[in-house]
Amino acid sequence: MEKLVKFGFVGMLNTIINMVIYNILLFCGLNYIFANSIGYGIGMINSYVWNNIWVFKTKSKSIHTIIKFIIVNIIVLGINNGLLFILVKEFDLNKTIAQILVIVVTTLINFVGSKLWTFKEKNEEVS
């Protein structure tokens, strides 16, 4: 439960970073999918640092951990962009409201991927 709370805290920080960048880029006229991808990417860097050293306490510098982190986040970004597109184009939701709804869903997916695969501790490995 402690990891979930810490992950949520880091996620809130990432969400703030993502939403600020997303809305600035929208204001500047950038397409909402591109704006989301850029904001997500910058938040992802913050996420890796804090999840690695504070949430999951692996402090791993392993290229394998970094690759796993990138894979999980590319999958989550794909889901994020897909759901964002559907909510904006099919349901005509406001782009910012749609992004907030999508973040709720994708945060859970990201936590599961991070806990069960990316930052899984060696003593948790299944043979």
Image (cartoon, rainbow, N blue to C red):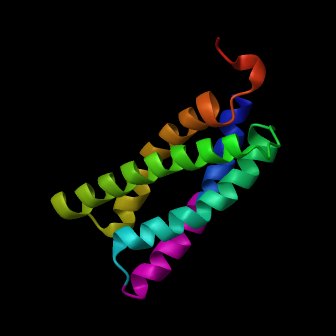
Q: Is residue 39 above or below residue 114?
A: below
Left or right for 26, reference 8: left
- Residue 32 on the magenta segment: no
Indicate the position of residue 46 as horizontal and vertical percent values: 68, 60
User: Which residue is drawn at the image coordinates 68% and 18% (left, top)?
Assistant: 125
Residue 98 picture quarter: bottom left
Q: Is residue 3 above or below residue 23?
A: above
Name the main secondary structure of what is drawn in magenta: helix
Q: Which residues are magenta?
A: 15-29
Give the farthest residue toward the left.
90
Front position in the image: 125 or 19:
125
User: Which residue is drawn at the image coordinates 42% and 88% (left, top)?
Assistant: 28
Indicate the position of residue 38 as horizontal and vertical percent values: 50, 70
User: Which residue is drawn at the image coordinates 35% and 72% (left, top)?
Assistant: 32
Indicate the position of residue 111 as horizontal and vertical percent values: 57, 38
Give the farthest residue toward the bottom.
28
User: Which residue is drawn at the image coordinates 53% and 45% (left, top)?
Assistant: 71
Indicate the position of residue 22 as horizontal and vertical percent values: 47, 72
Q: Locate the C terminus by quadrant.
A: top right
Front position in the image: 61 or 84:
61
Left or right for 60, reference 44: right
Would residue 92 be seen by someone viewing this image from the given angle?
A: no
